[in-house]
Image (spheres, rainbow, N blue to C red):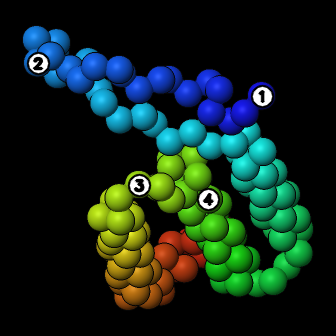
Amino acid sequence: MKPNDHAHPAPSTPPSGDEPSHLQHTEIAHVMPVRMLWLVWGSLMFLTIVTVAVTSIDLGSRFNLIVAMGIATIKAGLVATYFMHLRWDRPFHTLVFAGSLLFVSLFIAMTLLDKSEYEADIEEMYIRQAQ
């Protein structure tokens, strides 16, 4: 069975204009081979196992976080690229997605920089709670 056997056929006649706008669909969705989907899924499962395995190794809290976030970023990229079909979409959509990631990273970085201002107060609070 070929990968395209399950694809919906393109309409043989163009829409008449009398149909509702949601039925005036002339493009065919991108069809992926099942093998590629399984490979991406296998990669995601492997990276999940690596994430769990890395937590059992003490690399220091900061480096453990960096490794976990790096693996999570790779996994998110695989999901967006293949399962959300961003690889075959318009380049503008990839630009919007990358820009969104950039701004989220910027906001998280700004929050982490601000955390150092209050770190002494937070440590003091934990010491008081332990007493």
Q: Looking at the picture, which amino acid does disc 3 mark?
A: Asp
The residue carrying mark 2 is: 17
The residue drawn where x is 78% and y is 52% is 39
The residue carrying mark 3 is: 89
Residue 28 visible? The answer is yes
Q: Looking at the picture, which amino acid does disc 1 mark?
A: Met
Among numbered discs 2 and 1, the one appearing first in the sequence: 1
Place residue 49 in its image quadrant: bottom right
Between the C-alphas of marks 2 and 4, the distance is 38 Å
Between the C-alphas of marks 3 and 4, the distance is 14 Å
Among numbered discs 3 and 4, the one appearing first in the sequence: 4
Among numbered discs 1 and 3, the one appearing first in the sequence: 1
Q: Looking at the picture, which amino acid does disc 4 mark?
A: Leu
Q: Looking at the picture, which amino acid does disc 2 mark?
A: Gly
Can you give x and y, in whole percent of width and height, for residue 58 in the image? Answer: 85, 79
Q: Nearer the viewer, mark 3 or mark 4?
A: 3
Q: Decide: marks 1, 4 in contact (CB < 8 A)?
A: no
Along the line of sight, which residue is nearer the eye, 36 or 79?
36
Give the class, few, some or many, for how many residues have Cα within 10 Å of label 4's Cα (few <14, many ≥20).
some
Along the line of sight, which residue is nearer the eye, 68 or 94?
94
